[in-house]
Each structure stands twice: as structure tokens, then as C-alpha cells.
Image: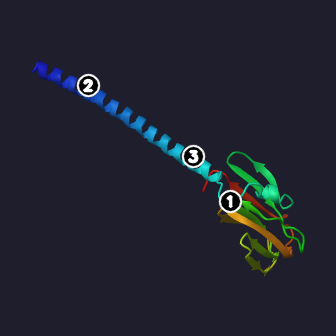
Amino acid sequence: MRYAKRDRHLILRTMRRSARFLKVLTIASSSMVCTVCLTAFAAHHYLYGQSTDASFPSGYDAVQAAPASHKVVFENAFVRVLQVTLPPKGGTEPMHHHRWPSLFLGYDTGGTTPHIRYHRADGKVVDQPSQTEPVHAGVWSGNWMKPEPMHAIEVVDPGKAGPGAPPGWLRVEIKCAQ
């Protein structure tokens, strides 16, 4: 009987050690898998953001090619925030691209939207006529945009926003996402 009690005690102690070892092993392996996955994810997105795709030729980044309509408000390794404005009536901004996906933010106060023509690199032109909305209190709107290949915006008529509308829009480019 005395040995049985001691054996049970040894067995329980061994089981506790095994359970602790398994717990540590599980945490360590989970951490390793997470680290590998995060590294692969970051590498993919870093490489994606540095694409040499023909749709995104060097020297045609929006800030470089169309600086009059694209001003950097903030930039770090992860995002770049641009204030985007339109050229005056009859003007066309130079061909440029936006390499990264982005959130395009506008403050809508009603009024008349601009009438623009969107020129693509393949020569196609998309006409976007203006629309009139009743003037109203300002409301933020946001649109998710994929990376935008070479294009230019021609302003047929700049429109007239309602009172209190800031000049242009904000484009938050996500440097490390697809």
C-alpha cells in the first residue's frame, strides 16, 4: 500500500511535468508559426508595394508627376496621406499613377460636383458629368480604391461645392497592403 501511494505521487508529478512541457511546447510552436506567417505576409506586401509592373512606371508617381494636384500631408513607412485637388477649368493634370491601394475621403456639403474626363493610358476617355445635390450640412464619405494605373484628370467644369467644403479630398495610401 505504501508503495502504491508513492507510485501514484510519482506518476502525478511526472504527468504535471509532462503537461507543463506540452504547454510550453505548444506556446513556443504557436509563436513560431505566427512569426513565420507574419514574416511571409510582410514580405509579400513589401514586395507588392515595390511592384515594377508596367502599369506603375517609375517617375510617374502622383506626387512626382502631378505635384500641383497631389500634396503630401503625412507620410511614414506604412501610409502616405495626400491632399488631392483638381486643376482649374480646362486644365488637365499630367499622367500619373497611384501604386498603393487607398482610402479616398471627401467632405460632401452638396452643390454641383465637378464635370471631369478620366483619361486612361490606353487612350480611352471616360466622361463623368457633374451632378447637382441640394446644399446640406457636411458629411464625410469614403471610397476604397485599388492601386490606380496611369491616368490623368481633365476638368471640363470645376463645379461648385456647398459652403464649408474644404478644397479637394484626402487620399490615404496604404503602403503595406494589397
Give the mark, 3 or 2, whose residue is nearer the N terminus: 2
- Is residue 143 at least partly visible in the picture? yes
Observer-nearest residue: 138 or 150? Answer: 150
Q: Which residue is mark 3?
A: 43
Q: Residue at x 76, y 57 (%)?
A: 61
Which SS class for mark 2?
A: helix
Image coordinates for residue 35, horizontal then vertical, percent: 50, 40
The amino acid marked with disc number 3 is Ala
Image coordinates for residue 139, horizontal then vertical, percent: 75, 68
The amino acid marked with disc number 1 is Ser
Which SS class for mark 1?
A: strand
Say left or right for 50 vs 162: left
Tell us which disc is closer to us: 2 or 1.
Answer: 1
Q: Which residue is mark 1?
A: 102
Tell us which disc is closer to us: 3 or 2.
Answer: 3
Say left or right for 143 vs 133: left
Tell us which disc is closer to us: 3 or 1.
Answer: 3
